[in-house]
Amino acid sequence: MTKQQQLDELKADILEKNICPELAAQATQLVMGDGNLDADIVFIGEAPGKKEDELGLPFMGASGKFLNEMLVQAGLQRSDVYITNVVKYRPPKNRDPSKAEKQAFLPYLLRQLEIINPKVVITLGRHSMEYFLPGAVIGDIHGQPHDIQIDGVDWKIIPLYHPAAALYNGSLRQTLIDDFVRIPKMIAT
Ligand code: URA
C-alpha cells in the first residue's frame, strides 16, 4: 500500500469510528494534513481554524502565511514538508481543544507519523508539544531537539512556538524565526 492509501485508510477510520462527534457535527470537514508524504519534517499544530475548515487544509490563514514565510527563510517550501494538527476538526469559535479531544486524536496522529516516517517532528505550540514532552516549558526548550521513544518507536522532536502566538509579538516572532532558520542544520546532524 502506498503512503497515500494508508493515510486515506486512516482518514476513513476516523470517520467510521466517529471520533469527537460533537466537533465533527459543527465542522465543515476533517482536516487530515497536507504536504510531501516523504518529507523529512512533519509540523504539528493545534487544530484547524476557520480558513482551514473551509479549505480542508492545515495552516491556510494568517498563521499559515507566517509559517510559509518562515519556511522560505529556512530555505524550505511547503511542498518539502508535511503539516498537520493534533485535533483534526475545527473547535467551535476556535476555542482550545479539550484534553479529551486531543487524547481521542493522538493514536491517529501517531499512526500518521509512522506512515510518513519523518526524520524530525516539529511541534508548534503547547498542544502538540505536551504530548511528546509532557511537563516541558516552551520558553525553556524551544528550538532544541529532543530524542524520545513512544511505544518503542524513536522520534526526534523539536518544539517551537506556535506561529499564531508569535505573529503579533515582536520578540517572540524573532525567536521563532531564529529557531526556524536553524532547522535545516539540526536535521543534518
Ligand atoms: N493553527 C493551527 O494550529 N493549525 C492550523 O491548521 C491553523 C492554525
Image (cartoon, rainbow, N blue to C red):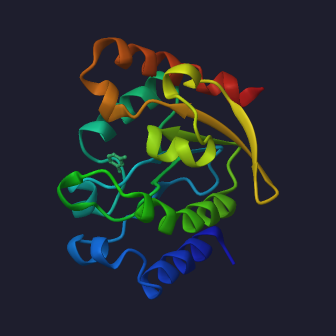
Depth order, front residue of 68/129: 129
In the rendered structure, the answer to whether residue 99 lies left or right of residue 48 reads: right
**Residue at 32% in and 30% down:** 165
Residue 178 visible (yes or no): yes
Depth order, front residue of 157/151: 151
Quadrant of the image occupied by residue 61: top left
Depth order, front residue of 183/48: 48
Q: Is 132 rendered above or below residue 67?
A: below
Q: Position of residue 121 (x, y in %)?
A: 62, 43
Which residue is most to the right? 152
Q: Is 66 rendered above or below residue 99?
A: above
Numbered circles on residues, count: 0
**Residue at 36% in and 70% down:** 30
Quarter of the picture holding the C terminus: top right
Q: Is 157 rendered above or below residue 115?
A: above
Q: Position of residue 86 (x, y in %)?
A: 47, 56
Which residue is most to the left? 93
In the rendered structure, the answer to whether residue 135 lies left or right of residue 54 reads: right
Residue 81 visible (yes or no): no
In the rendered structure, the answer to whether residue 110 lies left or right of residue 33 reads: right
Depth order, front residue of 69/164: 164
